[in-house]
Image (cartoon, helix red, strand yellow):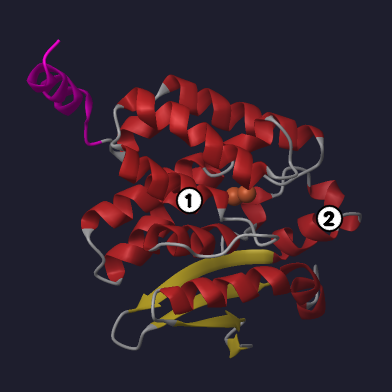
Amino acid sequence: MSEGQSAFRDEEAVRIVTPEMVLNDPESRQLIEMADRYLNQIGYTNHGLSHVGNVARSARRILDELDYPERDGELAAIAGLLHDIGNVVHRNGHAHTSGVMTFDILRRLGMPLVEIATVAGAVGNHDETDGAPVSAPSAALIIADKCDVIRTRVRNRTMIHWDIHDRVNYAVTESQVVVEREARLITLELTVDTEISTVMEYFEIFLTRMKICRKASQFLNCDFKLVMNGTALS
Ligand SMILES: [Fe+2]
Ligand SMILES: [Fe+2]
């Protein structure tokens, strides 16, 4: 085969992979559902299609509202859909595992390597334990994921008496990420039922998450603010 022929074949193989293509890919959906099933077994909040769908939409909106190129928003959304699939292997290190797993899926769908590397880097860096923003899609994914705190993620209401994560999530009745491009400000606005969980409990669980949100916002040249029940806390 001549060089010209192989270049033509490579060009043909490369496709623009959209978030919708990933969402409709049966293998990706199966991995998202199985990861959520295993996390359910070990007592974690919802990490299924509703969580990754929320994260994908929110990550894309953050970059769109800050006027990043449209493709950055699409890559952030794809990273949002795939960021938790590594939980099928193990909870610990799941961000890294998810990142490695994206290569197989996105190569099969025909994504160019440089875009796969962007998605993998974002996915691999989304966890607050050892992640850090490495690109605009990565920063947006971190903010979208850490801000997806809401009552509907709790699977079993009785657990709110025993599990602080369930209690804090259940206490959040409304949650919204507000992006102000001109003011360069990203705000997480929460409505919290303080009869269910105290503000102190929220910070006990979410302080490290809020710290990485600030770091990710700074990567996007924005400040990060947390507003709880109308009061600015950071
Ligand atoms: Fe995660
Ligand atoms: Fe997540």
Query: At 47% from the left edge and 45% from the top edge, which residue is drawn?
Result: 120
Q: Nearer the viewer, residue 153 or 132?
A: 132
Q: Locate the N terminus and report the quarter of the image it occupies.
A: top left
Query: At 10% from the left edge and 17% from the top edge, which residue is drawn?
Result: 5
| Mark positioned earlier in the residue sequence (1 or 2) | 1
Side of 140 where 101 appears, left or right: right
Q: Nearer the viewer, residue 183 or 173?
A: 183
Q: Which mark is residue 121?
A: 1
Q: Position of residue 167 (x, y in %)?
A: 79, 60
Q: Locate the C terminus and report the quarter of the image it occupies.
A: bottom right
Q: Which residues are magenta?
A: 1-16
Residue 47 in view here: no
**Circle 2 sits on which residue?**
160
Amino acid of disc 1: Gly
Q: Closer to us: mark 1 or mark 2? A: 1
User: Mark 2 falls on what kind of element?
Assistant: helix
- Relative to 133, residue 70 above or below: above
Is 35 one of the magenta-colored residues?
A: no
Secondary structure, magenta segment, majority class: helix
Q: Position of residue 151 (x, y in %)?
A: 66, 56
